[in-house]
Image (cartoon, helix red, strand yellow):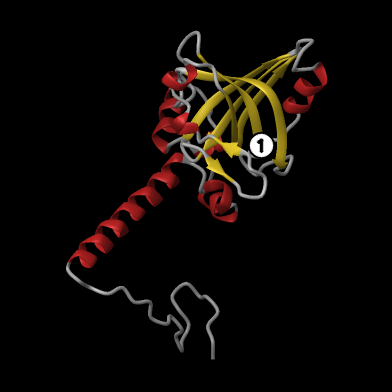
Amino acid sequence: MQSRLPLSGRAWTPLDALTKELASSSPTVLVRARLAAVRGKGKSAFLVLRQRTETVQAVMFADDETVSKAMVKYASAIPKESIVDVEGVLVPAKEPIASCTQSEVELKVRGVWAISRAAGALPFELVDACRSEAEVAAAAEKGELLAKVEQNVRLDNRALDLRTPASQAIFRVQSAVCQLFRNTLLSLDFQEIHTPKLISGASEGGAAVFS
């Protein structure tokens, strides 16, 4: 499955479609995703790309044909959580990649473009926000100190906090419940309506209202 924009004609492949079966033919694919992690070392760079909860590893090594040292340096300097386009050859991974949901395949990068750069310094690391209180407590018992993202920091940076697997799972459950209610009522010949939501008094959340 590919998504195609009518203006450019370019086709983007979703990460959940990057399977071992697809990699058997070593196709060249183009993906657009957030840069979850990047690690550059010398002539190589390793990137983790994320779409919602799906992740895949992309690797690039400087050679004389498609990837230059400048390209590796450019990719290594892209801030995490930026939106990037990555073109590469999908190949089976030599060994399972435990840190990615697409553990059986990886992308051999031929090109990378930063579509929308994130701020250089994020208010917190997403990996810290993904960590549960139980994990922090368990590490503390072993004498390890793990970073903890407080609730006020999460709320002040809600757009970033919504990218955690826990937040994504909440929205998936909400979506499924709403769809179930909608389909059930439609099957019983109900008609869906959308009533005005203007109120005369202030709501509990203190949101601004119309007079």
Which is more toward the observer, 103 or 66? Answer: 66
Task: Give the residue pinned by disc 1.
Answer: 84
Q: How many marks?
A: 1
Q: Is 180 displayed left or right of 15 in the figure?
A: left
Identify whether 87 is placed above or below 64.
below
Quarter residue 86 falls in: top right
Q: Is residue 140 left or right of residue 7?
A: left
Comparing 95 with 169, the one in front is 95
Give percent across and percent down for residue 14.
50, 36
Q: Residues within 10 Å of mark 1 (few under 14, many from 20)?
A: many
Q: Residue at x 39, y 34 (%)?
A: 134
Q: In this view, which residue lies farthest toward the right? A: 70
State the residue lying farthest toward the bottom.
Answer: 211
Residue 125 seen in this snapshot: no
Q: Disc 1 marks which amino acid?
A: Val
Toward the viewer: 37 or 191? 191
Residue 125: percent from the left, percent from the top?
Answer: 60, 37
- Report x, y in % for residue 128: 54, 35
> Residue 33 placed where, x, y %?
59, 37
Q: Quadrant of the C terminus?
A: bottom right
Q: Secondary structure at mark 1?
A: strand
Q: Is residue 72 above or below residue 189?
A: above
Q: Is residue 99 above or below residue 44?
A: below
Considering depth in this image, is 112 or 47 the residue closer to the camera?
112
Residue at 50 percent across and 16 percent down: it is 25
**Residue lying at 58% horizontally and 38% vertically, measured from the top left:** 11
Q: Name which residue lies at 17% across and 68% down.
A: 188
**Res 89 seen here:** yes
